[in-house]
Image (cartoon, grey):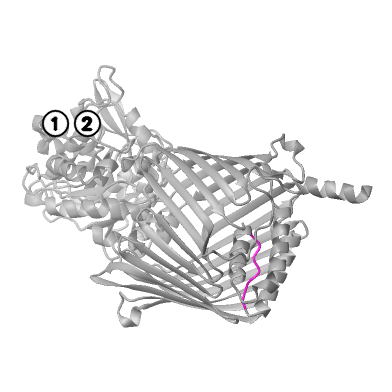
Amino acid sequence: MIRRRRFLTLSAGASAALWAHGCGDTPFTPAPPDASPTPLPGGPSAPPVFVPKVNEPINIHPVRRLGSDPRQGGNDLVIVPELVALQMRAVYEMGFDGIRLTAPLGNRGDVMAAVAYTRAARALGIDAVVVLATFAGLTPAQALWSDTMRPQFLALFNRLFARPPEPAAPGAGGLGPRGVGRIAFQVLNEPSLFFGIPPDVYVQEFLVPTFVELKTLNSQIIVVSAAEVGSSSGPLRIRAMLEAGLEGACDRVAYHIYVPEALERLPPHVRQTVWVTESGTSSTSGHLAWVRDMHPRIKARLEDATRVFYYVLYDSDPGRFRLIDIEPAGGSYRAVVESTELHAYYMQRVRDRAAGRPLIPFDTLIPDITRYFATPDDVAAYDAFELP
Amino acid sequence: VILPSLGFLLAQALVPQYPVGGPEPPDFLAAGDPFKLVDLRYHMSDTGRATHELLARFKIRDSAYLGASFEGERGRLTLQTQRLHVELGETNGVYDLLATWRAPRFIASVDVERLRERQGRKGWYLSPWVGVRVAESLELQASGTMDSRYEAGDAFRSATVGFDWHRGASAGAFGEYTHARAETLAGFENTVRSGSLAVVAQIGPTELSGDGRVDDVDGRFPRREAQAALGARVSLTSRLVAFGAARQHFERDLTAHEYSGGVTWFGRRFRLPRARTSAQHAAALARRATRMGYNEWPVFDDDELRSQRERLSLSRERAALVEDMAALYREQVEARELPLFGAAYVDAADSLSGAKSQTLRVLVGVPWPITWPWRATEASVPFLRLDLARERVVPAGEFAAVSYSLGATLSLNREMDLVARWSRREPTPLDLIRRVGVRHTAEVTFVYAFGR
C-alpha cells in the first residue's frame, strides 16, 4: 500500500511505553471472543508464565525514531531503544504469536532496526516474517534478480535475521530452536504494485532462484512468497503466479485480503500452506468485526490458510488501520490505544487463556532491549555488502 | 482537336510522377532470365549492438519464386509456385518447415518445428491445416496441433474448426472453435474451449469491424474469459477520415482495455479499401481465378494483392488473367493513399500487470512533387512521411517510463522505400531491476518490392 511508503518518512523518535486509551467516540467495551482459548492449567498460585500467544500475528513497522533529526541523514543508525521496546511490549502483552516487518535493503538504519525487532520477537518465542522488500526504490529486487548479488544478499540477511537468539527465558514457547520464534523470509511484497514485476516473471526470475538459494543456505528459513494486492485485482495475479509454478517455489503461499471480493476470488485450495500476510480494514470502528468475523471467514474459505496477519500495530495514519498511536510523554513515549475494541478483544483472549495465572512482565524478560540490537560486526557485514 | 488535347493534358497531369522511375505498370508476366530480382530488403537495428537482416527473392524463369533471408542467427529459404509454398527455417541448428499446397477446392498446409527439451524428451511440433472451398464465398477450415514430447495419448494438443466467409468486398466474417490442452509453467494442464467471431463490413462511408472471443478454461483454476473489440473508420469528407476502436477483456469484471481514436487528413481523395473500385475488381479477379481452379480468396490490401498477383503470374492461365491484374494494379495506383496529417491517441490498462499507458501518435506527410500540404493534387504521390510517437507507461505504483520515437519514410517510387527510425525508451522498473537503462534505438531499412 502506498501509504506505507509515506509512513517511514514520517516516522519519529521515542521512549518508554505506557498503555493509554484513545479518546475517540468508541466506548471501551470489550467484545466477547468468538472462541475462547483453552485456559492454562494452574491458577493464580502457579508460577508466572509467558503471556500466552493466543492471538494471530500482526504486522509492525520497525519504527526507530519519531521525527527527523537534522544531524542525521536517511542512512543513519539512530534507533531509539524505547520505541523498539514499546512496540515489542505491545506485541508481547497482546499475545500475538508472530510479527511481520520489512527490512529494506538499501536503508541501513531501517534494516538495523528490523534486526532489533526480529531478534527480540524471536527471543520471546514469537515468529518473525522478514519481508525482503522496500518502501521506496528497487534495491532488494535488483539484488534478488542478480545471480551474483543474490547469494551475498541472502547470506547477509541469514546472518542478520536467521541466527536464533538466546531465549528471553526458558519456556518462551516458540517453535524454533530452544523455544525461540521461527524465522521466515518473504520474497518481495506486492511485486506488481511496488516493482512492476509481472506475476510469471516474479515466480520464474525472483522466487525460484531465491528459494533454491535459501534452501541451500539455511533450511530453517521458511520461504514465503510475495502476496499480491488485497483488492479485487490481486487474485488474478495470484492465479497467474500459481500457473507459473508458485507452489513449488516456496514454503508458504501468501495472500493479502483487504476487501471481501478478494477473498471470494482467491482459489480456495492450493498445494501449499497459505499465510494471509496482510488483512485489515481502513476504519477503526470496523477493526473488531474484521478480526472477529472476517478472519474466521478467511480460514473457512481458504482451507490451506493457517495464519492471518492483522495490518497493523502502528503507523502514522490516525483512524485507519493502526491499533495504537505513539505519543511523546514527558521525556519518553507512550502507546495510546486507538482501536479500543480490537485491543480489548485481544487482551480478553489473553486473560481467558491465562485463566488468572500470573504472567511474566515484559521488562522482566527484556530489561534491556539493546541486547537485541545489531552488533558492530553486523553493521560491518552490512557495510561490506555492495549495494546494487 | 482542342478537346482531345485537353484530355491528354489532363491525363498527363493526373499521372503520378515519382522521384525515381516512371509510373509504368510492371510487366507481371516477365520471366526471370533465369533470375529476376523481385524483393530486396535490408534492415539494421542498433540498440547498443547492431543486428542486420537481409532478404532477397527472385523469380526463376516463369516457374517459381525463390527467396532467402538472414536475420541474426536465423536463416530462411522460401519457394513459391502457384500451388506450392514452402518455407524452411533454421535457428542455431534447429529447423522448422511450413509447406502449403493450393488445390482447386482446398488448401492444405503443415507446419513442423523442432522443439526444445521437455521433461527430458525432445520432440516435434506438428500443425496440419486444411481449408475446403465449399462455395465461392465460403471456406470451411480444420486444423490441429501435435507435440511429440507428450505421451501418445496426450500428444494431440488442439483441434480447431472454423469458417471464412465473404460477401464480395462489402462484408466478411471469420469464426472458429478450438478445443485445446494447454500446459502452464507450473506443469498442470488446462483444457481451453474457445470460440471466436470476427466481422468486417463496409456500410456507406463507414467501415465497421468487430470481433469477440470467449475462452472457457477448465483446470485447477477454472474461469471464463471474454474479449470484445469494436472499430470504425468513417470518411468524414473526401480527404478526412476519423477512426476509433475499443478492445476490452473481461473476467467477471473488466480487466483490461485499449481505447483508441484519431483522424487522418489526406492530400488527395481517399476511399476506404473496401469502398474502392479496386475492391470490386479484386473480388472479381479472385472469383475468376477460383473458377479457373486457382482457389484465390478476395484480398484488398496492397501486399496481399501483390502476393496474389505473383501466384497467378505463375499459373497456366496467366495470359488470360494479366489484363485483369494490370487493370487492378492501375486502380490500386489510382487509389493510392497520401496521408499528410494524422493524430491518434491510445489509452490502455491491464489489471493483471497493473500497467497503464497513454500513447500519442502524429504523422506529417510531404507529397511529391514537393509542395505545401494544401497544394497537393490528385497527381501527387507519397514522398516523405514523418511519424512521431510519445508513449507514457505507468507499470507500477508511482513509476512512469516515457518513450519517444521518430520515423522518416522516403518513398523513392511505389516499389522503393528508405526508412529511418530512432527511438528513446526510458526504463521501466523491471528494466532497472534487470540493470537496463535508457535505450536508444536506431533503425535503417531499405525496401524494394517489384510490382507492389
* Figure check: B227 above or below B444: below
Q: Amino acid at mark 2?
A: Arg
Say which of A121 and A152 sits in front.
A152
> Which quadrant holds the C terminus of chain A?
top left
Magenta segment, prevailing SS (helix, strand or loop): loop
Where residue B53 is drawn, which disc sits there? none
> Which quadrant holds the N terminus of chain A?
top left
The magenta segment is B294-301
Does B422 sit left or right of B417 as displayed?
A: left
* Disc 1: which residue: A379
* Disc 2: which residue: A108
Q: Dot 1: within a 10 Å radius of its alpha carbon, few (fewer than 14), some, or many (20 or more) residues?
A: some
Residue A236 on image: x %, y %? 42, 57
SS state under label 1 = helix
Q: Name the residue: 68% across, 79% down.
A: B291
Name the chain under label 2. Answer: A
SS state under label 2 = helix
Say which of B106 and A285 sits in front.
B106
Look at the image and say whether residue B44 sits in the magenta stretch.
Answer: no
Image marks 2 and 1: residues in contact by CB distance under 8 Å = yes
